[in-house]
Image: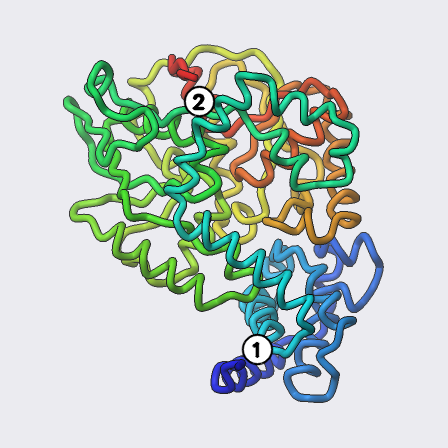
Amino acid sequence: MPDQKSSITRKKFIIEQSNQCVSCGLCLPHCPTYRLLKSESDSPRGRIVLMNGVAAGKIPLNARFIEHMDRCLTCRACEKVCPNNVSYGCLIDETRAFIIDRPVSFKKKFQTTLIFYLQKIFFSKPQRLDRLRFLFIFMQSRGFLRWMRSFHRLKPNRMLKIIANLPVAKIPYRSPQAIGTTASNNTWQSLYPVKENKRGDVALFLGCVARLTDTEALNASIYVLNRLGYSVHVPAQQTCCGAIYQHSGHVREACSLAEQNNMAFSLPNIDAIITTASGCGAQLTEANVLDRSIPVLDINQFLASYQNWESIELAPLPEKILIHDPCTLRNILHGQNAPYSVISRIPNAEIVALEGNDQCCGAAGTYFLDQADISDALLENKLNALTKSGSKLLLTSNVGCSMFFVQAIRERNLGVEVLHPIVLLAKQMGWQPIA
C-alpha cells in the first residue's frame, strides 16, 4: 500500500515549490531536452507546470506525464540561471517519488521491483562488487570482453555494451608498507598513512560502481594525497551514495544509505571527505546527514586549494588536453574550474574545454538505458566536438560520463584516451599503476 502520509506531504511540497516558478523562460536555452525536442513539456518550465497540475489534481498522473518526467536528465543546468532560485532538483526527485506511490500493472510492478532489488544486491552492499573484481580481471585477461565487443548481436543491448567496454579492472592500491605482506589484493586498507611531513588526514569515498570500474582513479587519489602529506582513511562500512535511488524516486532508500555513510565517516580529526566521482560528491553534499563540519570535496576541488605545489615535481606533457565538465561538478558542486586549475600545473600542457560543456553528455546515471534516443543525440554532439578538437586525450571527473565516452569512442575507433584528471596528475608525478 502506498504511504498516504508521504504522498500528501509530497503533494504539498511540489505545489509550494512549483509556485515559486514565474515562468520567465530563462531556463529554456539551458535545458538539453528542450533544445533537442523543442517541446515546452520537456523544458524545466513546462515540467514544473505539469508537476503542479498533477499534485493539485488538475492533471491526471498518466503515462504521458510520466514520459515528460522521465525525459529529464536531472542535469540541473536550469537551477544555475533561475532568477527565483527554484529548487528544481528537489522538485523532480519528489515528483518521481510521488509517481512510484501510484498503483501500477503487475507487469510494470514486476519489472520495477526486479530492477530495484538488483540495485539493492550490488549498490546497497558495494563490497559485493569488490568480490567481482577478479572475475572481471579473469574475463578481460582471457579476452572475453573483447569478444563481446565484436559480437554483432550485442549491439541492441546497451547494458551489455557498457559491460563489454568496462575499463581494465585494477586491484586496490597498496601502500609501500603493505607490499610484501599477506594483505589481500582485493581489499582496501582502512588507512594509507603518511610517515613524514604529514599535513593532515582525509577520508576517501569509494562509491559502488566506481570501486570496480574506476579503481584507477581511487588508487591515483590515494597516491597523490599521500605524496602531498595526507593520510587517507577508507572506512570499510561506507556504502553507495544513494544517487541512483534518489533520482529514481526511492527517497527512503537514499536516506538509509546516507545515514549509513554518516556513521561510517564519523571519524575523528578528518579534514575532508574526498570523492572522485562528481555524481557521488553531489549526492553526499546534498544528502545533508554527513557531519557538516567536515566538508565533502571533489578531489579536484581539494587539490585546487592545495598551497605547496612548489615541492612537487611534475613531468612535462606537451599535448592538447580536453576537459569535459560533468553536470554534477558544474551545476551542483560548482567546481568546474578546479580540474583546469589542477591540470594547468603540468608543464607544457595545452588545456582546452570540450565544446558544449554547458550541456549534458547524455549518460546521466541510468538515463542512457531508459532514454536511448535522446541520450545518443546528446552524445553525438560531444563526439563531434571531440573529433573537431583533434585531441587524443579527454579528461572527465565522473565515472558514468567516462564509461559512456569510452564505449562510443571504441565503437567509432576514434583513438582517444579517456582519463580522470587525478590519474593523469598521478602519472605525471611518477605513479606507475599496477594491474
Secondary-structure class at tag 2: helix
Three-letter amino acid code at the position of disc 2: Leu
Q: Nearer the viewer, residue 107 or 405?
A: 107
Image location (x, y in percent) of residue 326: 58, 42
Would you say 432 lies left or right of 424 here? left
Three-letter amino acid code at the position of disc 1: Gln
Q: Coloured how?
A: rainbow
Would you say 274 lies left or right of 49 here? left
Which circle marks residue 401 in the picture?
Answer: none
Residue at the farthest right position: 38
The quarter holding residue 216 reads top left
> Label 2: few (<14), some or many (≥20) within 10 Å?
many
Which circle marks residue 17 in the picture?
Answer: 1
The quarter holding residue 242 reads bottom left
Q: Is residue 44 above or below residue 179?
A: below
Q: Is residue 41 above or below residue 206?
A: below
Would you say 194 lies left or right of 72 here? left
Mark 2 and mark 1 lie on one chain; the one further toward the N terminus is 1
Residue marked by disc 2: 425
Image location (x, y in percent) of residue 40: 80, 67
Report the quarter where the C terminus lies. Answer: top left
Image location (x, y in percent) of residue 255: 40, 64
Residue 50 shows in this picture = yes
* x 74%, y 83%: residue: 60
* x 68%, y 60%: residue: 72
Would you say 95 lies left or right of 176 here? right
The quarter holding residue 27 reads bottom right
Instruction: Give the distance between the C-alpha atoms of the residues marked 2 and 1, in whole angstroms.
Output: 42 Å
* x 53%, y 13%: residue: 348
Residue at the farthest bottom position: 57
